[in-house]
Image (tube, grey):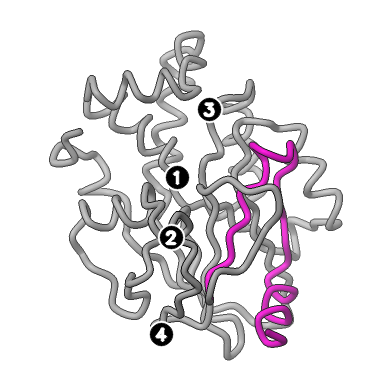
Amino acid sequence: MNLVKSPLASQNPIQVKMQINERKRIFVIGDLDADLTKFEQALCSVNFNPSEDILISLGDVIDRGEHSIALLARFKELGVHMCLGNHEHMLLESLLAGDKSYYRLWVENGGRWHLDATDEELAFVCKQLLQCPLSYYVEYGKVKVGLSHTTHADWDWQNPTQDIQQAIGTLLWDRSLTKEKKALINPSIDFSVHGHNTTQKPYWLGNSYHLDTNYLSGKPTIIELSTLIKQFSSM
């Protein structure tokens, strides 16, 4: 795959920093796989209030399901903060960079829905995704939390690389941390939260939390950041 042509290189930021008052409720949600119904159910389960609460998505919102466009439209309506996932990356490389290798991979892994979409709908999708960063660095009171689709054990949250190719590989595609199952501590962050690596139940691995439950359990995980802080503090 040729990442040199990546449309991410000139537009998508590698990291966005957020400072949020700890009295405000922040929720993090994992991979949705284009299922609007499950997304709405997840919001209801935590009594999400878009006028008061903050929601951050860890990417892989699109593909496999039937509601890729509708979900992104709903995200825009609710003001959801969204990281790119590898499925969004495949879409951008396919539609904007015309990369044939990415296109084959995307279509084989749930991207066929785009064949029935209009040019206007695909333009809307691309515009939305080009506004998404690869990661968020959240200062929530005194706690510093990293949020991205996936990560590597040595990713520096305090001083992230500006090499877009390295960042794409680390934050959108890497599986080494969960494959090796090593409970490593990343010293550049209090803890981080990620999707991408499918699991029946969310789990801690060192100071990283992994919650991509939708594909295996049939239900996406949504969790309040304050709950994770309490969990991490008690370990």
Q: Name the residue under label 1.
A: 85
Q: Which of marks 1 and 4 is in front?
A: 4
What residue sits right under mark 4 in the picture? 187
- Confirm or deny contact between disc 2 and disc 3 (CB under 8 A): no
Image coordinates of residue 146 in percent, x first then y, are 48, 70
Q: Identify residue type, mark 3.
A: Asp
Which numbered disc flags the more N-terminal residue, 1 or 2? 1
Question: How busy is the neighbourhood of tag 4: few (under 14 within 10 Å), some, or many (20 plus)?
Answer: some
Quick check: is 218 in the magenta stretch?
yes
Q: Give the range drawn in magenta.
A: 207-235
Residues packed near mark 1 inside 10 Å, few (<14), some (14 to 19) or many (20 plus): many
Q: In this view, does 21 lie to the left or right of 97?
A: right
Given the image, on which type of amino acid does mark 4 rest?
Pro
- Of the residues under marks 1 and 4, which one precedes in the sequence? 1
Separation of marks 1 and 4 at Cα, in angstroms: 24 Å
Residue corresponding to mark 2:
180
